[in-house]
Amino acid sequence: MAGVSLKCGDCGALLKSVEEAQEHAELTSHSNFAESTEAVLNLVCTTCSKPCRSKTESDLHTKRTGHTEFVDKTMETVKPISLEAPKAAAMEIDNIDGSSGSGDASEVEMVVPGVDKNILEELEGMGFPKARATRALHYSGNASLEAAVNWVVEHENDPDVDEMPKVPANSNSGPPKPALTPEEVKIKAQELRERARKKKEEEEKRMEREREKERIRIGKELLEAKRIEEDNERKRIILLRKAEKEEERRAREKIRQKVEEDKAERRRKLGLPAEDPAAAKPSVPVVEEKKVNSSLPIRPATKTEKMRECLRSLKQAHKEDDAKVKRAFQTLLTYMGNVAKNPDEEKFRKIRLTNQTFQERVGSLRGGIEFMELCGFEKMEGGEFLFLPRDKIDPAVINSAGTELNSAINNPFFGVL
């Protein structure tokens, strides 16, 4: 099979003709070429009809333009490669031999296409290489500076973007289109900058909207996670309380059984008959029972009961202002919580009585300071401070105070009777 391309032995590039091989050699200094039966790939974009000579070039085109549909026209354009020398070289040989060389008349001379010199100078002034600027003007049809710049942006990753374009000599005819005036150039440049600025602003707004949506989504997920965690914590506390009550019931039952066993053992050692559970207890004269009962000491109120009575008195004294009472209970609960969580921090155990916030919430209410004294706080420095010494912190008392305060806050019937 005849060769259909020339393959560069140095870089593996496939070239369609001898002219392309010469241009490749001038640009790369490669000189090792061989005839190949592998056709040069010709992928044509169905959207803009741009030909791509490699899969890499088509991928770059897709990345720049978003066009993804290509038609493989390799076999339609393949033809045997001609290894004859270009026309210029053939003419030199003919001149040496003194012959006309009519057999080489079919060779076409390739030259740099004519472009608008003024636009070319403007592009070079903008920093583009001459070859790239010439290529952009040629393929954009010498239309305008804007068209040339757009072509450069779209093809900046083409492998041959900096190669000087070549066209047949007989096709390089006709004057280039007139150049833009300096005023038109300024207007076009301003339009390009304005268009780029608007595009950037739109992209920034879109990204900001996306970021805001993401923030809202994350916020909702965090709230949902917090709600689930709180529900699980409530369920855990309920189960823990049930378990504690069940454990307490079993403990009481165990103690009762132990007492019964000890009583039965004592009766057995004394030689007494076993006690009949159904038997009635011996009656005791009423007068004697009264005397015995009257001689028993009265059980003093516990500290927890005193706390409950103190809170009940506070609510009764200010029953016309429920919000004020609830705020006082919540403030006291905060004090107790701070002491329980940070017993070593003195700032949570020392309160200035003249503090305006303390006076408004607790100090000015009947029973507020009394409740704190029941929790262990003491007046010091001439009654200026309430202070709870570290060695006098009783966790059981603090926990009982928190329990009573929670009951006072959450029970709507607390202190009503």
Image (cartoon, helix red, strand yellow):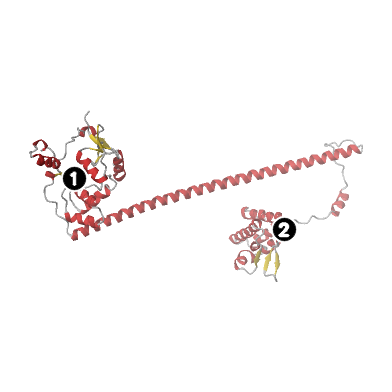
Q: Residue furthest top?
A: 1
Q: Residue furthest right?
A: 271
Q: Residue furthest bottom?
A: 382
> Residue 149: which numbered mark, if any?
none
Task: Determine the image quadrant of residue 121.
Answer: bottom left
First in sequence: mark 2 vs mark 1: 1
> Residue 306: which numbered mark, if any?
2
Q: Residue at x 60, y 68 (%)?
A: 356
The correct choice, above or below, for 334 with respect to 50 in the image is below
| Crowdedness near tag 1: few (<14), some (14–19) or many (≥20) residues, C-alpha within 10 Å | some
The correct choice, above or below, for 45 with respect to 140 in the image is above
Q: Mark 1 — residue?
A: 166
Q: Is residue 83 left or right of residue 246?
A: left
- What is the x, y in percent for residue 151? 24, 49
- What is the x, y in percent for residue 110? 16, 44
Total numbered labels: 2
Q: What is the three-letter code of the residue carrying label 1?
A: Lys
Q: Residue at x 36, y 53 (%)?
A: 205
In this orientation, which residue lies closer to the viewer: 268 or 167? 167
- What is the x, y in percent for residue 294? 85, 54
The correct choice, above or below, for 179 with respect to 247 in the image is below
- What is the x, y in percent for residue 101? 9, 37
In this orientation, which residue lies closer to the viewer: 188 or 114? 114
